[in-house]
Image (cartoon, grey):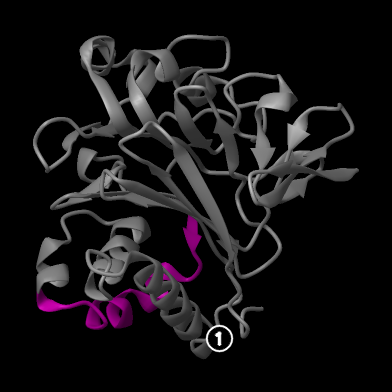
Amino acid sequence: MSCGRQHGNYTLGWFEGNAGRVTSGFTYLGWEILVCRWLAYIGEPRLIEEFLYDGPHSLTEQAQHSHKAKLGVHGDGGGLGWYGKPSTPGLYRDAGPAWADPNLRELTRVIESHVFFAHVRASTGAPNLDVNCHPFRSGGLLFMHNGQVGGFQQMRRKLFEMLSDTGFNSIVGGTDSEVLFQLMISNGLHEEPELAIRRTIEEVDALRRAEGIKEAFRATLAVTDGKTIHALRWASDKAAPSLYLNRMKSGALAVSEPLDEDISNWWAVPANSLLHITYDKDGVVSERRDAFIIPSAA
């Protein structure tokens, strides 16, 4: 069944599966088909360890035992991006399983940040290398993605041609996610993030359809400049990877999968949504949800 819950000035909803657990997005035989897990936090400074390691369903626990993915192990690397006093965010990535990374554990134990991204990866084909791990960074921006660019290898050459020279020269890995990030930057992500996100999704999906590719384009992603988090849940089909929002006392947390089983804490963001989450100097969290519709999408 589905139902909605009022949150601020918009309505979000959750979906309950046969077992009564919170679920959302595309399911197959009762399991959600997902390839990565991520979280994005904005608010009062918090120790990152609290979200990555503390609790029975922390991000590193999800990496080992996801409750919503049929193949529940996400061991193809992990990464962390955080903001501190410098304007450029810190970045740590490693190709090994996040739960077994002592350096990640040590960093999160001592780093306190008001905005941070964390990601655990289950590869869809790109090599298991640290340069292919999320988040990705460009100047003051961080980006991470859960999903796939359908037909990426078939479109790769033409996607590269759509990049600016700077964007092309910035590619160091082999993932569709990194190319998607650089396309957004080429489309003005630093200057007009909302327009750049929309324009990039439209252009990539238009190319996918022009090439006759049937494989879907799915994107649940987040990007931030350290002041605002933009989080998108969208797919060219009806299988957008899940996205949940928790408005906490200290701030706001967007995640691929809830960090606990109390459904009253979590709102499932509807598909075809673009969230904008800010935290002002007075400690007030504000959210806005825009419809994100690509009219020609399949």
Judge whether residue 97 can be spotted in this image. no
Q: Residues within 10 Å of mark 1 (few under 14, many from 20)?
A: few
Q: Residue at x 22, y 77 (%)?
A: 163
Report x, y in % for residue 49.
35, 14
Q: Using the image, determine if residue 146 lies above or below residue 234.
A: above
Nearest to the observer: residue 168 or residue 95: 168
- In the picture, which quadrant includes the N terminus? top right
Residue 30, x across and y down, in percent: 81, 39
Q: Give left or right: position of 22 versus 231.
A: right
- Residue projecting furthest to the front: 282
Instruction: Look at 47% across and 71% down and name the residue there.
Output: 151
Q: Which residues are magenta?
A: 146-165
- Residue at the spot 11% in from the left edge and 31% down from the top edge: 85
Observer able to see residue 116: yes
Q: In what quadrant of the picture does the C terminus appear?
A: bottom right
Q: Which residue is drawn at the image coordinates 63% and 56% (left, top)?
A: 240
